[in-house]
Amino acid sequence: MSVPNDVLVVGASAAGLATVEALRRKGYAGRVTVLGAEPHLPYDRPPLSKQVLAGSWEPERAQLRPPAVLSALDADFVLGDPATGFDASARAVRTASGRVLSADAVVVATGLRPRTLPGQDGLVGVHVLRSLDDALALRMDLLSCTRLVVVGDGVLGAEIAATACGLGVPVTLAGPQAAPLALQLGRPVADLLAELHTERGVELRLGAAVTGLAERQGRVTGVRLETGEVLPADVVVVAFGAAPATEWLSGSGLELDNGLVCDSRCRAAEGVYAAGDAARWHHETLSRPVRLENRTNATEQAIAVAGNLLGEDRPYTPIPYFWTDQFDAKIHVHGMPSPDAEVSIVEGALAERRFVAVYRRDGQVTGVLGWNMPKQARQHRQQLTAAFQLAGPA
């Protein structure tokens, strides 16, 4: 495909904006349109569960770029109008308002939609946390909350629990894992995280799945566990995962399977690419499809997509990376740790809550984690780089 005359980016968050910025940095002078479902200018999502929810940041501070910088990109931002359909052969996007936008190349960057519990919709006091508006609505409820239950023991749920606890809200964290993030970080680190939350006042009710909500006269009153127990609550946050926001692509002819399926160049079809949480692409080094839900990947994949749109023809083969801040713990994770990996502490000590952990499977390094040791974790990441190179294509 030759360099497109115009590009339509569907999604106005981190991946979408990074695509536009990368195109302009690489000298692209064609027309660019950005379609966003929300009415807001592009903003960052990681601060929503921390600084914005805590009230230490005004919402404007979460904006990724000031209006003047966005204006200099010479892109047309069409906001508050979600995509509802797509004709891949014509590269034409239909929107909720009835618009039809088309371009020589389309980049799908629509991110995620939160998973929900049965009966959740319309119930007063029940929240998800994906958007800026979600964060502001939850903060308002937390200011008068007498008992918060967070449903979900992954990164988002644990961050929300920590932030709410810091606001003085009584918090219960519920989920099926033995400890927060156990499936991502393994037991030694997850157990330490559980210890930290408990010390700070979070009540952990883990090891039992949540099956639904209790309510009275349209307002939530509790969370039901598979054991039959009901955890009392006047505010509930449902944060047990999200799904790629690709339902608008149904019937488009594109392959959807836990995201928009792409080749190693992040290309789903001729002139159609994907970046960020909604993209599931073939990672050549790992020799398998990968979909990553983190801020770093949103930016890095967008840069790769912009380059391939302009003819660079390079595979996207990142080493995964994410971070999480909970209380005074700053955790940086490189690679792909797993609960069945052998974990060794190579610097610092668990007891000191300042350490670097290296994860190995079959003798090969698969992950590096730093707990309040980000610089040292980056240094040990070199072992991971070698391991990823050794993995190679099958």
Image (cartoon, helix red, strand yellow):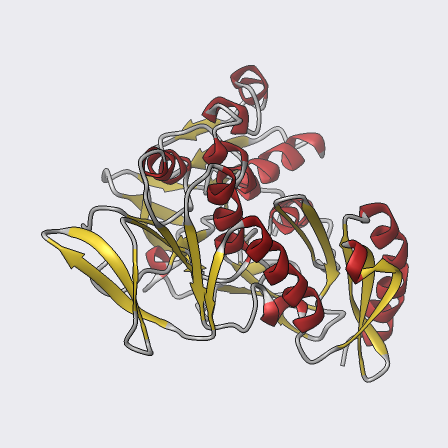
Residue 108 seen in this snapshot: no
Please give the name of the residue rendered at 40% of the width and 29% of the height, measured from the top-left corner: 40
> Where residue 83 sits: x, y (%)?
34, 46
Is 269 left or right of 215, judged from the image as shown? right
Is 16 left or right of 141, judged from the image as shown? right
The foreground one among 109 and 127 is 127
| Above or below, comparing residue 57 to residue 195 in the picture | above
Please give the name of the residue rendered at 22% of the width and 53% of the height, measured from the top-left corner: 220
Count of numbered labels shown in the rendering: 0
> Where residue 349 sits: x, y (%)?
84, 60
Residue extending furthest left? Answer: 217
Please give the name of the residue rendered at 34% of the width and 59% of the height, measured from the top-left corner: 247
The foreground one among 51 and 142 is 142
Q: Quadrant of the C terminus?
A: bottom right
Residue 259 seen in this snapshot: yes
| Above or below, comparing residue 365 to residue 293 in the picture | below
The foreground one among 118 and 159 is 159
Residue extending furthest bottom? Answer: 362
> Where residue 141 sits: x, y (%)?
31, 38
> Where residue 103 sits: x, y (%)?
45, 42
Is 21 left or right of 378, judged from the image as shown? left
